[in-house]
Amino acid sequence: MTQYGSREIMDVVLKDPSTGEPKVYLESLTTSTFEFQGSTVYARGGKGHPKRIGWDSEKDVTLNMEDALISKESLGVLTGSEFKKGVKAVHKKEVITVEELDTLTLEKEPLTTKPVFFYRTVDGTSMGEKLISATPVTQEITLTGLAVGEKVIADYYYSAPDTTQSMTVASDVFPGTYLLEGTTMWRNEDGKDVEALYTVPKLKVLPGFSIGMASTGDPQPFTFTCEVLKDTKSTAMVIIDLLED
């Protein structure tokens, strides 16, 4: 009897279950774990009321994957949305040191359709006196009473280029269902690695996920929590193929 050990991550591709077209490759996973569960009910009877016959049902299979990195495609899988290119108004906060009396020069051209605010500041964070521009707001602005060396917070919007890619996490859009194909290695007792292929005909990505941001500690992974559904054309939920010689 051949026995195996499993100590390698799985490379995954999620595909459209109807067309087979790849939607995302997950090849920087740190963990991927299948969990199999079910329910058992029993007929009891006789002295001591012992269990006599058992019935198994309610097969549940979950797959949890953690990815060290995120891509636009994998974030799209988690949200059910897609990134789209287009011009967009983008917020910007600048802390500008005055170099010319009563004059500020912004890094970007501010949008006249959006509000613009200016505040004196000591440290770049605290908002002091609110300043009013003496001229129409353009990239170069006149603010009376400014001395050379003073700091000013400028809060405004500018137009990002049409190469900008944006995603909206909408209230009525959720992750979809995919065909999963995964590849990993199992090692036998002779020390030989055998390729193990996992196929999940219907994998439902669940809508819960988190994006962690921290200035200390390890980078936060991105978690894909998935439920395995029964195949439409068979009873299969997970198929494992070992490519032995």
Image (cartoon, grey):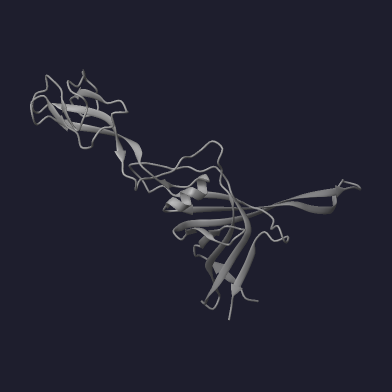
Q: Residue at x 76, y 52 (%)?
A: 57
Q: Residue at x 9, y 28 (%)?
A: 149
In the picture shown, does residue 79 fall above or below 54?
above
Residue 237 percent location from the top left of the image: 67, 59
Along the horizontal axis of the image, is 26 left or right of 219? right
Front-most of 62 and 17? Answer: 17
Residue 240 percent location from the top left of the image: 62, 67
Residue 120 percent location from the top left of the image: 19, 23
Residue lying furthest bottom: 245
Along the horizontal axis of the image, is 180 left or right of 158? right
Quadrant of residue 243 within the rendered picture? bottom right
Along the horizontal axis of the image, is 184 left or right of 203? left
Along the horizontal axis of the image, is 163 left or right of 126? right
Residue 54 percent location from the top left of the image: 82, 53
Front-most of 144 and 67? Answer: 144
In the picture shown, does residue 16 fall above or below 243?
above
